[in-house]
Amino acid sequence: MSVLDCEKRQQKGAHASMAEDTCTLTTFYTSWEAYQAHIARALAPRAAMQFALRAAPHLRSIGELALHIVACRAYWFIEFLGEDGGEEMKMYASWNEVALKPGAPIPPAADLVQGLERTWQLIAECLARGSPDEMRCTFPDEWDGKPVAVSRAWVAWHVMEHDLHHGGELSLTLGVHNLPADFPG
């Protein structure tokens, strides 16, 4: 559905729930994909020593942020939701524990960019095939010692907001060190 189709529906007074409004979801997903491409382009030209740069001593380095973004994506979709991403995705998911520790060993830029691209492909495939009923499907989790039910839709939202949060940190850190980044705005 194009933007014009959405505008026509609004003019005619047609209303649909957000889950049924493919225009809204398509906008979110395509914008998320574009944002992830900005992250990849910002990382691709970085030298190994630039991955150690931090905005402040207590914050994650550029490399730690990138590792954390890739690992989080893989963890939620592979480990938590149980998607089958093959051995490569299991490897990215295994980065999660490493990524949470300061001073984590950082793979080369090409490996991080590939991790971003491959985890995005997995996310896009999962979102493309997910029906509204599948997105409402819940999985047990525990927060602060309390059992909760987490939906596929919530996982997609959480990974998106995680990308936005840490992508912003990445942009700030690059800017603090006068390194060019390809972030909009």
Image (cartoon, rainbow, N blue to C red):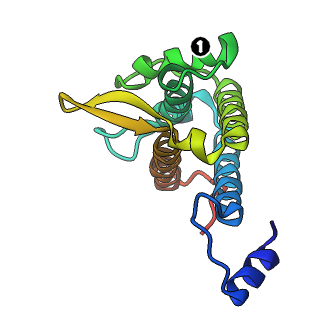
Q: Which residue in the rendered view is the most extreme toward the left?
A: 145
Q: Nearer the viewer, residue 172 or 7?
A: 7
* Residue plotted at (47% across, 50% down): 161
Q: Nearer the viewer, residue 27 or 170?
A: 27
Left or right, 147 with respect to 51, comes to: left
The picture places residue 55, in percent across and down from the top left corner, at 39, 47
Q: Amino acid at mark 1?
A: Met
How many labels were placed on the picture?
Answer: 1
Q: Quadrant of the N terminus?
A: bottom right
* Residue plotted at (46% across, 31% down): 64
The picture places residue 155, in percent across and down from the top left corner, at 48, 39
The picture places residue 173, in percent across and down from the top left corner, at 47, 49
Is label 1 in a helix, a strand or a loop?
helix
The picture places residue 75, in percent across and down from the top left corner, at 50, 25
Q: Quadrant of residue 100?
A: top left
Residue 45 visible, this angle: no
How busy is the neighbourhood of tag 1: few (under 14 within 10 Å), some, or many (20 plus)?
some
* Residue plotted at (48% across, 53% down): 168
Left or right, 82 with respect to 143, comes to: right
* Residue plotted at (51% across, 56% down): 175
Q: Which residue in the rendered view is the most extreme toward the bottom?
A: 11
Residue 40 visible, this angle: yes
Q: Is residue 174 placed above or below 9 in the rendered structure? A: above
Q: Nearer the viewer, residue 14 or 55?
A: 14
Q: Quadrant of the C terminus?
A: bottom right
Q: Which residue in the rendered view is the most extreme toward the top?
A: 87
Left or right, 24 with respect to 97, comes to: right
The residue pinned by badge 1 equals 91
